[in-house]
């Protein structure tokens, strides 16, 4: 999505117990609607939008997406790069980032991919193999 995610510790390092990802989200960035029923996700310093409403976070805020498949997304609506730390329990979400992302040098951003049918299908197929779901960009609108 044009974000830069660095996996600090992955499931291969924790026996699958958890993964922690350092995330840099450029202005206007953030992943589209997605769900991971078997994974709990915690993060801070972002706006979180889910099926249950919107939460606007400020620096130091903490948000949790519980297990169960809640469809959610987040979006950086500031003019600055947002920096957040994401922990998932158990691990697995980082595998989706590896499957659909591209390597990039630290602190650099790639342009967001075209959210066309081909990309959405690729992301949905990768997510399905990992027990996760990816929805069209306007799913929560």
Image (cartoon, grey):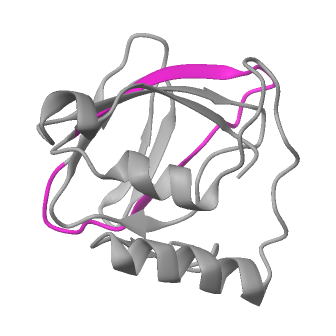
Task: Report the front residue among 31 and 122.
Answer: 122
Q: Is residue 51 found left or right of 23 in the rendered image?
A: left
Apparent side of residue 113 relative to residue 137 in the rendered image (left or right): right
- At a point 29% along the width and 62% down the height, the residue shown is 52
The residue drawn where x is 50% and y is 83% is: 125
Query: Residue 54: in sight, yes or no?
Result: no
Q: Note whether 36 is above or below 1 in the view shown.
A: below
- Judge whether residue 81 is colored magenta: yes
As for residue 41 lying within the magenta part, the answer is no
Residue at the outermost top position: 60
Q: Position of residue 113 (x, y in %)?
A: 81, 62
Tell me how many marks there are: 0
For residue 14, which quarter of the picture?
Answer: top left
**Where residue 22 sits: x, y (%)?**
49, 23
Whether 4 is drawn above or below 62: the answer is below
Q: Tell me if I can see residue 42 in this picture.
A: yes
Q: Is residue 28 above or below residue 58?
A: below
Q: Residue at x 25, y 39 (%)?
A: 11
Q: Where the C terminus falls, by quadrant? A: bottom right
* Residue stretch in magenta: 66-88
* Residue 81 image point, x, y percent: 73, 21
**Relative horizontal placement of residue 51, taking residue 31 as reference (left or right):** left
How far from the left and from the top, in percent, is residue 102?
A: 71, 48
In the displayed structure, 15 sits above or below 113; it is above
- Which corner quadrant of the image does residue 19 belong to? top left
Query: Which quadrant of the view contains residue 48?
Result: top left
Residue drawn at the location 11% of the way across and 37% of the way down: 17
């Amino acid at each position: 999505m044009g974000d830069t995610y660095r996996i600090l510790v992955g499931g291969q390092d924790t026996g699958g117990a958890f993964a922690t990802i350092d995330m840099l989200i450029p202005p206007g960035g953030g992943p589209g609607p997605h769900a991971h029923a078997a994974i709990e996700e915690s993060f801070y310093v972002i706006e979180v939008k889910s099926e249950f409403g919107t939460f606007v976070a400020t620096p130091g805020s903490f948000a949790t997406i519980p297990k169960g498949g809640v469809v959610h997304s987040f979006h950086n609506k500031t003019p600055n790069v947002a920096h957040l730390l994401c922990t998932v329990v158990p691990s697995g979400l980082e595998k989706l980032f590896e499957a659909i992302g591209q390597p990039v040098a630290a602190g650099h951003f790639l342009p967001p991919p075209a959210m066309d049918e081909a990309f959405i299908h690729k992301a949905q197929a990768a997510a399905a193999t990992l027990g996760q779901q990816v929805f069209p960009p306007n799913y929560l609108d």
